[in-house]
Image (cartoon, coloured by chain):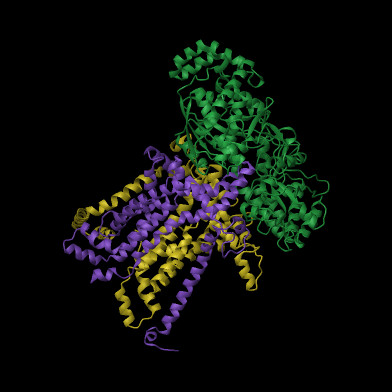
Chain colours: A purple, B yellow, C green
């Protein structure tokens, strides 16, 4: 075994660890990448070949019919626009609310926050159900409003808890004590210490909330009546599930066949079209996952 | 800290009580801004969650839409009793518990993934692995189940081809087997959610003090030791909180995936509380009945959460409240 | 272009309604009677609609003069309620490509004539059930719903719907009433709830003009039979031999003798369910429709089928098929999509389909499979004759409707002539229907139409559903539907075009002619049961049905033993199977 200067530093146990860890990662990447590749390939392949179950490695009978169908549909465009509005608006509102609350809860010197937390957690398990919620939203005049799509489900107790525990772990009490002695108020401390130290959790929250808004459809189905306000996911489900939805009725068999073929043609292209934009958010988020910059520098 | 104060005040004389009250008042005054921070979230929770909370009573009434929630007659525990009396009650409960407990094995995977990703030095490779593994989260359940049944096909599914390659039989009908159902459900769930769930741990790992690592390296600690003694302890609070939340949702087997994977052969293993509630509520419009079963489920979850939280508090000091 | 069509059709329709007004033909025989009652009707209407007081006075004056062209069958001037606006919630049909029903000709005609404006809200098909439930629960409802609401939903919310048995149908919608009387054997009684109320008006069905209705048909591939050199089987044992031959030989002729799947099914889909094969053993085991599964009517009594020797024999036969590898190995879990792909890839020798043409297959290649399973037991086809294919709960008026008379008036306008009914169902004349020698026939004139030039990828269904309301239209009785020409021909450019067996409707009709002869003699009557009783029944079904289907499926895979059969029969008891059967005798058969 050649022992260069560099290799000496890397002892055998570290190398063994790397080998095991990297094997694990490679296996994970392989088993994840094939199905993803499959979806991509399937989106440009004749649907008859897909359902026949033969292993697809490369597109067969390459065509873009699925994509053409998807982009021809006005609903996709209208849905895209609405989804972007709801996602951006909802993420802004949700992330700010979650982080402010999460920080406040992370402080151990806040009388009453324990009771409030319990009240929050209670709602994770117990709720009034759909009917009273509908009545409430109806009486607030929020039925069929875009504002509701932005507000609803933006704040989750789960996320607040995650932010709280992250901040408890990453912002040591000594920092606050030191700042308080320096005469630094809560506002200044939050802006100049908490925010720079919590970029990673901010990024995670933005990602969580943005993705949940992007994928949301249920509230839109229940509370919107104007089709021009529907987000993308409602239309996607409409397109993908229309055959199953209609199969209970004595539907016109010819219509069913037509729908079924259409669905099969666009099933995979729809996935690509609808998830690509939100997938692109991730690399921007990753920037904030750079490790080790924080505590040390502040502490020092 | 608040508990500490109250404990002391319980034991001490009135003067101490007075002092504590004073301190609380001072804290409230000093931290007024933090209350302002809580305000939007609190408003949201109270309006959107506590506003409709009175609807819980549907579970104890025979809800008739025309009569409204307040006007429908009380029936007490009738619905819970009806549920327990159904011939399939024990099967459904057993299935729910089996799948829930089994699903717990998915918990360490995202942590492992995050630690290993964190170990990768090459930034590009790191980002690549992270991006790829988190993508399955975006595959809708309908498509996921379609892919599962395609890969598990007894005719020409990839899995059966692999089994045959290693000398097994190639026509096992996994999707039609009740005993295979929990395995398929749990492992496909791990596949789908592992990368996504690892994000929070990757973020938590950014908070690890690099100086500690440098110092440990100088002391001759190898990678495994550093992970065990530096990385894991520093993300432990996050891990524990995630575990408590996970345990508190233990009976929450979602309906959609189970429902799509159900068929007449595996129904004995695949009927769980959520699918039963779904069928009840949607197909039969028995609002009260499905509300009662849902409540029953959530009470169990809530009790487990309280126990988990107490235990975590004693063992590690981190807790939800 | 569209304007022209509209104007032309308008003129035609107005002329037609004028004719009926004078002649008072059979369908609107009530006309004369109601004209006499017009004054009282107008008075009642005036009381309900304050704004219409002056209109009523005018109406009285002009009754005589205007009788010829603007008096409705209900005796009111057609524009009596002009200026009224009503809200209707609806849901688009699956092939309807319009964004709003106000684009449909019938809606425009009705607004033009009656002056009643409708505000439409189109809900997503996935949201319909849930949204309707929420609106019912909150009481915040539109004036009416134009889309089927389940009997169960109406039953549990019965007071939210306007009770039409108060005489308003007779007063404001006599034409609708007349159609209902001819469409059901028991007339308006078919719509009556056990408490005597009437809570809905029916809309038409998607089904054709046939009274018989069956599910998908089991068919066998004749080309495969020829390739393996065998005759058409007549018994289940012969069928077994044929399927074995399909399995062993290269029946689809692609050079690979091992890719054939002798028998195709997809158990999760009610249409392609393997349960249909019970027909051969004398059990009509259709999906849960009017005659349902797990039960049959014999000598006027609903009797159980899932505990019979025939049932067991059927499962044992299927187990034999399964063990021999003759059934699709994925049949219990696969989706309809996967099934369809295999079918169109020529992998199935026996399969279920609506008709070969509907599956994109060659109708010359496929033949109905009809075999006998047991000696002394006649096979019987699932399905019913005199099928009630209308949507009984297609149009419901809410109890809070702001103007019931106006709404009924509007609805009755669309029902007032055969032409309007047909426009309501299929859009303007000259496309999918046309006139020849004073008769209406279904037509293919749409092929050269401007609409099709604008939308080359539309099918006939798209056209019919987009231009008309299709199954959401006012009730059109079978007699009023447009028939095919002689021998199933259709009109094309003014001539009859011979029937094309490769055309889906024709193909299905030909098959139906044969199947009709195999249907049961007895069936359950069409009626509306007590909502509380229905709730009790569905509670049983939620547990009972999965138990039975699970036993059936595991028996097919693992076989039936005396032990498993006895345990199963005990389970039937504990799961309430016999209570469930008795339920039908008590609630449905009584009517």
Residue located at (71% from left, 44% from top): C502
Side (left or right) of A53 relative to C43: right
The answer, for residue C148, to whether it is visible in the render is no
Check the image and report above or below for A25 versus B93: below
Check the image and report above or below for B61 versus A64: above
Residue C560's x, y, as percent? 73, 57
Side (left or right) of C547 relative to C126: right
**Image quadrant occupied by the C terminus of chain A:** bottom left
Query: Which quadrant would residue B54 be assigned to in this image?
Result: top left
Side (left or right) of B110 relative to A300: right
Query: Which quadrant would residue B176 be assigned to in this image?
Result: bottom right
Residue A142's x, y, as percent? 38, 40
Q: Give whichever of A145, C268 is nearer the camera.
A: A145
Residue located at (50% from left, 60% from top): B100
Residue C273's x, y, as percent? 67, 50
Q: Give whichever of C560, C275 is nearer the camera.
A: C275
**Image quadrant occupied by the N terminus of chain A:** bottom left
């Amino acid at each position: 075994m050649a022992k260069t200067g560099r290799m000496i530093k890397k002892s055998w146990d570290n190398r063994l660890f790397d080998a095991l860890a990297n094997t694990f990662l490679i296996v994970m990447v392989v088993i994840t990448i094939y199905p993803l590749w499959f979806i991509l390939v399937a989106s440009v392949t004749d649907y008859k070949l897909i359902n026949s179950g033969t292993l697809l490695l490369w597109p067969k009978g390459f065509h873009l019919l699925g994509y053409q169908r998807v982009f021809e549909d006005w609903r996709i465009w209208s849905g895209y626009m609405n989804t972007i509005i709801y996602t951006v608006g909802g993420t802004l509102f949700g992330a700010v609310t979650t982080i402010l609350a999460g920080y406040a809860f992370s402080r151990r010197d806040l009388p009453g926050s324990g009771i409030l937390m319990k009240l929050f957690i209670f709602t994770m398990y117990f709720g009034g159900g759909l009917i009273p919620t509908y009545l409430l939203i109806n009486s607030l005049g929020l039925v069929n409003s875009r504002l509701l799509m932005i507000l609803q489900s933006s704040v989750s107790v789960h996320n607040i808890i995650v932010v709280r525990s992250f901040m408890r772990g990453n912002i040591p009490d000594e920092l606050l004590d030191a700042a308080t002695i320096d005469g630094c108020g809560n506002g200044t401390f939050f802006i100049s210490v908490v925010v720079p130290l919590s970029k990673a959790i901010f990024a995670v929250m933005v990602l969580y909330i943005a993705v949940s808004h992007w994928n949301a459809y249920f509230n839109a189905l229940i509370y919107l009546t104007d089709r021009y306000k529907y987000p993308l996911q409602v239309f996607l489900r409409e397109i993908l599930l229309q055959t199953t939805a209609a199969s209970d009725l004595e539907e016109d068999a010819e219509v069913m066949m037509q729908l079924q073929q259409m669905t099969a043609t666009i099933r995979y292209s729809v996935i690509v079209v609808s998830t690509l934009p939100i997938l692109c958010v991730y690399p921007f988020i990753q920037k904030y996952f750079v490790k080790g910059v924080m505590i040390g520098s502040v502490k020092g | 800290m608040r508990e500490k104060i109250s404990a002391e005040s319980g034991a001490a004389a009135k003067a101490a009580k007075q002092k504590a009250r004073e301190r609380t008042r001072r804290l409230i005054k000093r931290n007024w801004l933090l209350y302002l921070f809580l305000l939007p979230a609190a408003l949201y929770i109270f309006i959107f969650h506590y506003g409709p909370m009175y609807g819980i009573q549907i579970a104890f009434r025979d809800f008739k839409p025309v009569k409204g929630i307040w006007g429908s007659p009380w029936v007490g525990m009738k619905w819970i009793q009806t549920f327990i009396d159904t011939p399939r009650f024990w099967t459904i409960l057993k299935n729910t518990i089996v799948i829930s407990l089994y699903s717990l094995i998915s918990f360490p995977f995202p942590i492992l993934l995050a630690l290993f990703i964190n170990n990768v030095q090459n930034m590009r490779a790191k980002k690549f692995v992270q991006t790829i593994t988190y993508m399955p989260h975006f595959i809708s359940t309908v498509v996921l189940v379609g892919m599962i049944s395609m890969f598990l096909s007894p005719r020409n599914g990839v899995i059966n081809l692999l089994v045959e390659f290693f000398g097994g039989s190639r026509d096992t009908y996994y999707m039609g087997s009740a005993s295979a159902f929990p395995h398929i459900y749990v492992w496909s769930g791990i596949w789908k959610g592992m990368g996504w769930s690892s994000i929070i741990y990757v973020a938590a790992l950014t908070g690890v003090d690099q100086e500690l690592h440098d110092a440990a390296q100088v002391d001759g600690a190898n990678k495994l030791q550093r992970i065990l003694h530096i990385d894991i302890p520093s993300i432990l609070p996050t891990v524990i909180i995630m575990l408590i939340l996970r345990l508190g949702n233990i009976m929450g087997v979602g309906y959609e995936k189970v429902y799509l994977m159900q068929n007449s052969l595996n129904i004995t293993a695949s009927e769980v509380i959520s699918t039963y509630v779904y069928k009840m509520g949607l197909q039969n419009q028995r609002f009260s009945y499905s509300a009662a079963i849902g409540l029953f489920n959530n009470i169990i979850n809530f009790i487990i959460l309280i126990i988990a939280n107490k235990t975590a508090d004693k063992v590690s000091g981190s807790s939800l409240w | 272009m569209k304007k022209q069509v509209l104007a032309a059709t308008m003129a035609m329709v107005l002329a037609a309604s004028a004719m009926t007004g004078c002649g008072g033909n059979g369908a609107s025989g009530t006309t004369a009677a109601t004209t006499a009652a017009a004054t009282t009707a107008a008075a009642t209407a005036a009381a309900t609609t304050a704004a219409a007081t002056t209109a009523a006075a005018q109406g009285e004056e002009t009754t005589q003069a205007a009788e010829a062209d603007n008096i409705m069958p209900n005796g009111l001037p057609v524009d009596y309620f002009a200026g009224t606006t009503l809200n209707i919630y609806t849901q688009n049909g699956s092939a309807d490509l319009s964004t709003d029903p106000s684009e449909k000709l019938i809606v425009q005609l009705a607004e033009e004539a009656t002056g009643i404006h409708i505000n439409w809200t189109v809900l997503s098909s996935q949201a319909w059930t849930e949204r309707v439930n929420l609106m019912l629960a909150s009481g915040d409802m539109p004036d009416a719903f134009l889309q089927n609401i389940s009997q169960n939903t109406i039953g549990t919310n019965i007071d939210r719907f306007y009770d039409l048995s108060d005489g308003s149908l007779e007063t404001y919608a006599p034409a609708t009433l007349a159609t209902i009387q001819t469409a059901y054997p028991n007339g308006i009684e078919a719509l009556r709830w056990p408490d005597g109320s009437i809570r809905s008006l029916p809309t038409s069905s998607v089904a054709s003009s046939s009274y018989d209705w069956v599910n998908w048909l089991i068919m066998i591939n004749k080309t495969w039979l020829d390739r393996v050199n065998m005759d058409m089987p007549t018994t289940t044992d012969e069928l077994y031999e044929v399927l074995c031959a399909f399995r062993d030989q290269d029946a689809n002729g692609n050079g690979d003798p091992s890719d054939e799947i002798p028998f195709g099914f997809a158990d999760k889909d009610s249409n392609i369910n393997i349960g249909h094969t019970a027909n051969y053993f004398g059990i009509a085991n259709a999906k849960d429709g009017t005659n349902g599964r797990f039960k049959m009517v014999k000598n006027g009594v609903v009797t159980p089928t899932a505990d019979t020797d025939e049932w067991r024999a059927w499962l044992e036969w299927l187990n034999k098929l399964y063990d021999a590898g003759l059934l699709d190995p994925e049949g219990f879990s696969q989706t309809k999509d996967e099934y369809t792909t295999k079918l169109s890839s020529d992998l199935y020798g026996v399969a279920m389909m609506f008709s070969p043409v509907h599956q994109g297959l060659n109708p010359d290649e496929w033949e109905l499979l009809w075999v006998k399973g047991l000696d002394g037991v006649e096979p019987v086809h699932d399905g019913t004759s005199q099928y009630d294919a209308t949507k009984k709960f297609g149009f419901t008026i809410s109890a809070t409707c702001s103007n019931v008379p106006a709404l009924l008036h509007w609805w009755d306008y669309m029902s007032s002539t055969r032409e309007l009914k047909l426009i309501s169902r299929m859009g303007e004349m000259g496309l999918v229907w046309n006139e020849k020698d004073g008769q209406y026939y279904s037509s293919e004139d749409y092929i050269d139409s401007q609409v099709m030039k604008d939308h080359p990828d539309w099918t006939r269904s798209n056209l019919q559903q987009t231009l008309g309301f299709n199954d959401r239209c006012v009730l059109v009785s079978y007699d009023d539907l447009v028939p095919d020409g002689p021998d199933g021909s259709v009109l094309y450019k003014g001539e009859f075009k011979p029937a094309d067996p490769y055309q889906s409707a024709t193909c299905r009709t030909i098959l139906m002619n044969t199947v009709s002869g195999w249907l049961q003699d007895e069936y359950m009557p069409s009626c509306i049961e007590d909502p509380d009783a229905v709730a009790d029944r569905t509670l049983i079904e939620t547990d009972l049905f999965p138990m039975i289907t699970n036993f059936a499926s595991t028996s097919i895979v693992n076989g039936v033993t005396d032990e498993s059969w006895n345990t199963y029969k005990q389970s039937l008891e504990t799961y309430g199977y016999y209570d469930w059967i008795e339920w039908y005798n008590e609630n449905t058969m009584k009517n």
